Amino acid sequence: MDKELDLNSQIDISGIPRENIETKSSVNTMNDIITNDKIGEELVARNESIQSFVKESKDIIPDKDKEQLFPIETVKTKVIERYPDKIEETLDKLLTNNNLTQYKENFNPDGTLKNTENIDGKDKKNLEKISDKMNDEITDLTEEEQDRMMIETNEVIKTKAVEALIKNIGQYFQITSFQRGNLAEQFDIDVENGIKFDKDMLKLSGNMDGRDIGFYYDMENGKVRADDFIHFDGQSETKEDGVFFINRDQDRK
């Protein structure tokens, strides 16, 4: 949208979720999440909690910034270029209803009038009213487009934010030990039900070696904590022996 509208909003909106996102995936482990470049979009498509956050929570970009990001006149120009058939259809209806179809060529693509010097006063006055009505219709369409762009841009930003948060938590599992291998590959997680928002807390629930594990990301202060000890090969606390542990309630940035 930024490119199409010749804007300079400085917002990356290249990852807008599409309606036809594949809803079945091979995401089974934390490693799948970390290595999935589209995990944010997939979560929006598959996880009701994430979808609610992205589509229903408060917007990241306030409405007062709408005009700065998507100037109404710029959007209007592009709407006229993008929807010529819809605009022409509206004009045809107005002209037909007023028995003025013979003056169609006196309208520009944006609904303004041209070459009206030789049109008699009554018809000219009615054509001006039609032109005003066309401007109202195009303005309404432009505002709808502007609102849509704001909604989609907010959704993209929140989708990218969720993706970054989850991947940041996933980095705690990016540990490879000689005895156990890649721990991220051993942390099983259900992307539909194992990732949830609770107010300002993002919770990830999974399983490793038959143990249920919960991670909590406080979105207010950026801290992460686990709700239990996680010990493997638990005779030692050295990296060489393949031990991975997180102290209960220990804050981790």
Image (spheres, rainbow, N blue to C red):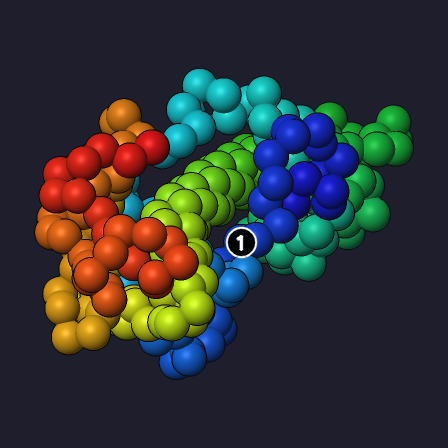
Q: Nearer the viewer, residue 139 or 57?
A: 57
Q: Nearer the viewer, residue 168 or 209?
A: 209
Q: Amino acid at mark 1?
A: Ile
**Residue plotted at (30% across, 68% down):** 187
Tell me the quarter of the picture where residue 49 sits: bottom left
- Tell me where residue 188 appears, x and y as whole percent: 28, 72
Q: Is 236 placed above or below 110 here?
A: below
Q: Is 241 placed above or below 179 here?
A: above
Position of the N terminus by quadrant: top right
> In screen coordinates, is 3 left or right of 97?
right
**Mark 1 lies on residue:** 16
Under circle 1, the secondary element is loop
Q: Nearer the viewer, residue 24 or 80?
A: 24
- Tell me where residue 245 appears, x and y as whole percent: 24, 52
> In screen coordinates, is 81 left or right of 153?
right
Position of the C terminus by quadrant: top left
Tell me the quarter of the picture where residue 9 sits: top right
